[in-house]
């Protein structure tokens, strides 16, 4: 059946939309057996297909990276181990690794960076891996990024000291573990959207980030939304969509 | 001590910042005994002081509303009961009540509405109270708003039917209970920031919205962030900040 | 744009599938403002649109029921209060109410019942409301149903007494609260699929059905799957799909 | 056996300590059938016996109050309903009720108030019932008390405005719901012990105060300890012990 | 006592059923000291005895496998490590290992495969180990199986592309981690029973699969039931019972 | 088929035990449509059938009570409301109600009480309803019972005062809410089995008895086992089985 | 002050009991710096001091074992690693190790075994480590013990086969993971106290034994109490106290 | 802008406090790129900046330690591994390591110890690492400290034996795992503030310290507050603030 025939049948009521959908061949897909690359994603969602390396083998990660590279898609792999990077580098010599952020990046499509910037605010030194994942991702997506690290509320004057830089951003990502109070405090001081990233930093009744997550969800400041625990990547994705509006 | 003296001491190192802060009188505050109205909030955060009525008495809500009204501040009270509305209406005759959203609104400052719009997408009829809270809040904050209701994933073609309206918004609020899958599905189809609002709709292992909350936090779509369960107000606040960028 | 033009553009790569979807008008939808009836559902999923009354107003339930009735769709409303029934009966005089199951049913399309039957096994008298919801739903969907009630494992010989009836069913729904052990015991005695429905019956560390839910999910018998706590409706839907294979 | 004989046997090894304990009559006890008043408690723990009214009947509360009154013990009943107060007032005419704090107090033993004071800091108007329970209890125990209400971190300048009063206290009780960030912020600004009281104020993923509880337990400020959710009474007890050191 | 005597006593009321049960020797049991093989299980439940290797020693697994093999029972061991496979292969040379699924299989009884098929749909590459466990088990039980992998809802057109294959199955197993939305989406598009398998894939507020589990339990699509997290084996068992109806 | 034929077939291997079970009629059952009374339970388990009234209607409770009464079975209904008692009393005039314990009892079979006794130790006045349920049940089952109430660890000398009575019991039931420490303390002082009953008394992070439950399960004293939250009935059942050894 | 003086003061009211307690030297204690051996425990509680090895160093375990040995106390160490056993054996050559149960035992005081016996019933092979801990402990405490292993409810006839042995015990310990249904089933078939030991065996929504724990706590059989997850030791302690009544 | 200009603008209302804050340079900060040392903390909060080593690299810990040392700040690093200590010792030769407490300390500022003392009471040998962290921290902060170890409630006479030492302290830290009952028992015997530190010692339903945490939060003794699980450091900080009042 040709697409035309399908739509005629649909128009005449001989097919439901669901049946029509079944018969339409799709293009934005690259089949790899164990993976189905969504080559259409960037156009559709404003965000490219990215490799989430956790739970994948070294071989799978490097194969997907190579395939994307060959298709001309810029490569970003998150949660990547050094072994994965070694394997990717053999196939894509120019790939770069950020050991703290655990990201592999290879970018051939140069893209002018945004004028407005995203600021990534982190509460403590221990929150840096998550913050760096956010920074790497946001830059990969073509955003200008500024960093404000180790300004947790136990010494709140450290935050005030950098307040101007924070207030002038278009979007603010706040990365914090323990009680996650930093998101509320920042949210109460700025007039820009704040995206909270709770981290699993802490111990005891922290419950792998649950305390910071609940804290940020219950923020008394109104303009704060939240992404998953340790999800610097997701925060950067949404921040990028906002920054490019 | 005059502000000048304070700063001199601070400059000379005779005072720490903390000590200096203690001595500086503040203006953006309206003391009411049981409440301290933050009259400076709108200027500082882009969002006005709002009355969260839950846990307050009828008397407290109507007094705060009146005081704000007298100061020329537009009034929005969320989670307000009909009794609270009656009490407010006696003091502010023009106040309006949305029984589904449980909001009281009185707006004297006319503000041109935004050009771009926020779309509020709701999965089921039962999610409407939360969706309406988001709609009322977003409009109160001066945004143009569109509604797409009852388009849950159990009949996903209902969503496709309205996809154009959704894709053309600047920000998308997705309100869903049960398994909250709608946020991920929408997130995978659009290139705009999506703010998920899990609702407490459902039963059994829904655990008052926990299932939808976890579902949205774990969304496989990258551009989705989340606010607290049933927090239509908070979603609208962030959406407004984004819409006005 | 006509459907034909849309598909041509899609074929030529001028449109992605997503863009195409946006432009295709759909039919299997009945708009009601606050509700979007999925009239195509029965054809697509083998299960009709059903009214889940919880969280809806009396007015909303009776309006949706009437609209479905007028379209010739059989009506099943679950979690319906007596007030809702009164309102529906005014619009659909022949509607029936099961006070234990909290279901409203009006069926005009007579459908020959299945030959094979579904058996609903309940552990205790207190589990009957959930069991009855399953029974009413399964019958509404055109299945022959048998009941085996109050045969919990504290007196396991009561179960053996009815074992033949259970083993001869095509599908078995096991409804149990407290520790939910009945699902495992039945699962170990039969060669048919068992669908467990944990109920919120019990107290203390029952946590509103969590104990029975976890118990059934961890069943040491291999052929057991589970639906949500108290979800007799969902169990009957799946049992019906299986029974009609 | 006389106490002397008991101790001799214990000394000679004819009795273990446990056996000796069984034979020693005790005095610091007032038996009431359904209650055993611990008349020795004040001397032993620095805190008097107090009536926790929740889960007791109106009759039980008023009987225990009367008995304590007759023994010359000052009466404090927490979580008391207006009905309980009516019943107590009939037996102890001078008793006082704080409807917000839900406390009944009758104090005949005048005690000079402490010189140093306890400050009770509350984040929002909705936290006032818990804050008032702390205030009433602390005053009952003979402490000077100051109040700083509605200074949550969404408008942190409200807190700075009152910082001097807070820093000059000997102990600080911080009462906060939602994300409970106030405890960390205050803890980072003062050099006195801070006792956090999470409240059940909030909604959704607040989980009846769990978010604030976890937040305070994970405070990044070092000098913060925590009492149970909504437990203004307990915070005041510890604050009193500290204030009197 | 002979069986006859036992039943006579039972008939005459001299014995209860429980007492009678105690005296009846059983046959469907193979005693191994540390294990009691249920040789009757296949006849009774339609599913054979299977070795769940987790928590067993290498020695125990290989001994049970050998004993079953000697009794002419086909061998399936799940959650088996490579070491276990080495030990089993020494005793059963023809045994096969699927390293991804962690299954050991030795099948001597050839069984004609079913005509209808089970389809295993997996959301992401990381969900493959669980999906493969389901595939291996279903094939071992004599079912024809089809695979549809990496079709998560972040790129929902990948699913539509394979919809025909899915809709023509007799039973559908949906394997998904993160938010598990795929089960609801598939459930809303097909008229066959859907068995959801939540996986522990994800991070943060995924809580080892809890998010996907709750999501699937709360599915707004009616024909979905759920098995335990990562339990591909259990899903395949129930799917097999259904497929053979 | 006669029982004899069944057993012959079983003996000859023509039937499995499961098949044999299906064909054996049972006697220890009294069918009531909505309930299946287990008349054999007392003989089999040493504990009679008891009516757990929660989740049953007034009509169901009174009907089951009457039926048991007519069969000569002593009646115990737990969690019974005053309305249930009124209905039962109309059918069984001699029935007795304990409003605190919420038990209905009618006992016609006089049974000599045990020589050894069970002691029920309760931490606070608020724990009395649960303690009384245990007392009523234990007496109903023919045990001598002693009570030691309001001896919580906040004033541990109250416990020592009654230690002899506690140490001389054959079994000890400890009923405690809040932190449930009493079970550990008693367990460390006696050489008899201790059964802990956590109660839902308390507030905040008590989580409806979870704190006391976890506390007792983690008791550092070795001879302590636990029953469900508020389950005075279950504790008395096990204590009775132990007391009668 | 002599004990006599102390008691005189106590008698005369010059001292409270608490003050008296402070002044009484105690004997049933052996100080070791990092440990305080409770040498009086056996006499007081019927159970000897036992070494819980988890969280202790190899050196600490072997030192405490030696010290107890030198004082003539029989040694039982639970949760002991092979390294700990090597260290203990150097100091106490006759010590024995059960690698499955992880227990070290050295018993010099021969004690006649009880006549009645404890039966340990385990659901699966994977539950054996916990069951063996219970067996070793019960034997160490001087009880006759019988074992019934691998009789889970997925093949319930395996249980019936051994029912007589189970029913004739004085106390029954049921060890089960997954859904823990075995405790309820056994509890419904016997007239002796049943102590359930949930194990952490299972996966997914088992949550390290939580499912089995909740299941046993909610048992519909009345005579079942529960100890902590994997706590074979505690179950044996209570069983021993009961068996020796 | 000079501080003077800033304050003038603030005085005249040309700036809000927030804007003023942004422009004020701060001094109590030492920037290190990855860390922002809060050199002002000791003066502001009475507690110095401390290195929480968990989640930091060996390199980061030793660099921060060196920088603090060079600034003349005493060094305390908690949760430090032996590798971290080696690295620190190379830079600060006089540094000391407590392997049990996992603390690195270097103190050059001799400070007279307090007269009153803090007592650290620990329930079991396994709780010693947490207790030692508290002891090391309290001594580092200049407090006299006494230790009372291994006095859990399973042998409560061990506690009475040391009661005088405990009662004479100014503050009491109680460290306990399992059911954490020790905090309540001590709280009921003394008239000084008690700070509970729940530990993660235990197994099964201990849930990494949750049982002890909930137990202490629900303490029936009034003067008990709680810090995070295993947080000996935090308890010592608050105890020090109290001890120095």
Image (cartoon, coloured by chain):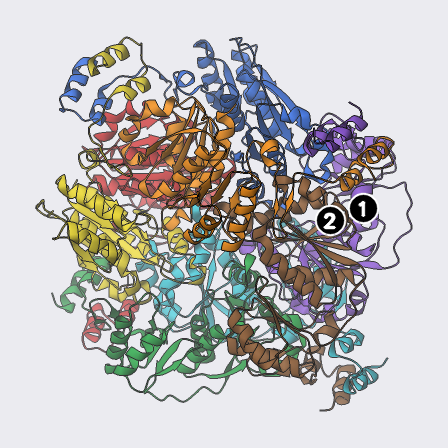
Chain colours: A orange, B blue, C purple, D red, E brown, F cyan, G green, H yellow
Please give left or right for residue C106 compared with residue B47 in the image.
right
**In which quarter of the view is residue E92 placed?**
bottom right
Please give left or right for residue B4 compared with residue B234 in the image.
left
Looking at the rendered structure, the secondary structure element under dot 1 is loop
The mark found on residue H46 in the picture is none
Q: Is residue H157 visible?
A: yes
- Residue highlighted by disc 1: C46
Other residues around mark 1 within 10 Å, as few (<14) / some (14–19) / many (≥20): many
Question: Looking at this view, is A93 or F139 the one in front?
Answer: A93
Other residues around mark 2 within 10 Å, as few (<14) / some (14–19) / many (≥20): many
- Residue highlighted by disc 2: E223
Question: Looking at this view, is B163 or B212 the one in front?
Answer: B163
User: Which residue is depicted at the point 13% across and 65% down?
Assistant: G5
Looking at the rendered structure, the secondary structure element under dot 2 is loop
Across and down, in percent, residue C218 comes to 60, 61
The number of numbered discs placed on residues in the rendered structure image is 2
Question: Looking at this view, is B26 or F106 the one in front?
Answer: B26
**In which quarter of the view is residue D213 placed?**
top left
User: Could you tell me if the residues under marks 1 and 2 are in contact, i.e. CB atoms within 8 Å?
Assistant: yes
């Amino acid at each position: 059946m040709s697409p035309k025939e399908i739509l005629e049948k649909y128009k005449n009521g001989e097919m439901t939309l669901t049946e029509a959908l079944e018969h339409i061949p799709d293009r934005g897909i690259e089949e790899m057996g164990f993976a189905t690359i969504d080559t259409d994603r960037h156009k559709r969602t404003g965000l490219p297909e990215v490799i989430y390396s956790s739970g994948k083998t070294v071989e799978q990660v490097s194969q997907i990276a190579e395939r994307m590279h060959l298709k001309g898609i810029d490569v970003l792999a998150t949660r990547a181990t050094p072994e994965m990077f070694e394997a990717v580098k053999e196939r894509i010599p120019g790939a770069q690794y950020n050991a703290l952020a655990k990201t592999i990046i290879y970018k051939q499509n140069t893209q002018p960076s945004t004028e407005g910037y995203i600021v990534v605010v982190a509460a403590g030194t221990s929150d840096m891996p998550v913050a760096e994942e956010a920074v790497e991702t946001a830059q990969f997506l073509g955003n200008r990024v500024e960093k404000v690290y180790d300004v947790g509320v136990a010494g709140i004057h450290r935050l005030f000291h950098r307040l101007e830089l924070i207030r002038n951003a278009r979007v603010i990502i706040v990365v914090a573990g323990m009680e996650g109070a930093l998101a509320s405090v920042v949210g109460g001081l700025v007039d820009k959207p704040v995206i909270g990233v709770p981290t699993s930093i802490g111990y005891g009744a922290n419950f792998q980030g649950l305390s910071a997550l609940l804290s940020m969800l219950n923020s008394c400041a109104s303009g704060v939304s939240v992404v998953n625990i340790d999800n610097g990547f997701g925060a950067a994705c949404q921040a990028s969509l906002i920054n490019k509006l």
